[in-house]
Amino acid sequence: MLACTYQLTSHTDRGQLIAGRRLDRATRADVNRELTQATIDESCVADTHSTFVVLAASSGFVQHTYVALDGCAVQQNLARWRGTEALRALLD
């Protein structure tokens, strides 16, 4: 799994890549466990953050998961959840 961190300079841009790394097996398992703890929360909006991580499978699988590092939103397939503090800590 790849974790690429982006910084927004405005909410109209797509963000600038500021870091990238391949998650090891243990971290990947921890991230996946924390993703299962995400809860539905319509109040978590993606436009309230300025730093986010894009998680992508290194095998080329095209589904991406977006995790706000300075907000609550986790987004996948246009669905949005509230991520845990532990998830953000793993990716920060």
Image: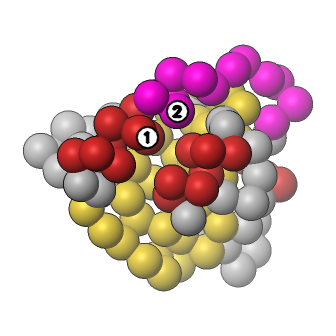
Q: Residue 61, located in which quarter of the rendered image?
A: top left
Residue for point 48% across, 81% down:
18
Give SS at disc 1. helix
Q: Which mark is residue 87?
A: none
Give me the residue at 69% from left, 45% from top: 85
Asked if the residue at tag 1 contacts the one at tag 2, i.e. Cβ–Cβ closer than 8 Å, the answer is: yes
Residue matched to label 1: 31
Packing grade of label 2 (10 A; few <14, some 14-19, many >=20) is: some
User: What's the residue type where badge 1 is placed?
Assistant: Val
Q: In the shown orientation, is residue 25 left or right of residue 37?
A: left
Q: Which residue is mark 2?
A: 34
Q: Is residue 83 left or right of residue 11?
A: left
- Name the one closer to the observer, 23 or 82: 23
Is residue 35 a member of the stretch shown in magenta? yes
Viewer-nearest residue: 73 or 14: 73
**Residue projecting furthest to the front:** 26
Tell me if 85 is positioned left or right of 61 in this view. right
Instruction: From the top left corner, tell me how far across and down residue 34 is, in percent.
Output: 52, 33
Which quadrant of the figure contains the C terminus?
Answer: bottom right
What is the residue that sits farthest to the top in this orientation? 40
What sort of colour scheme is used for the picture? secondary structure
Name the residue furthest left.
59
Is residue 53 visible from the viewing direction of this image? no
> Looking at the picture, which amino acid does disc 2 mark?
Glu
Which residues are drawn in magenta?
33-44
- Classify 10 Å Cα crowding around label 1: few (below 14), some (14-19), many (20 and above): many
Task: Classify residue 34 as left or right of residue 27.
Answer: right
Q: Secondary structure at mark 2?
A: helix
72 versus 6 height, above or below: above
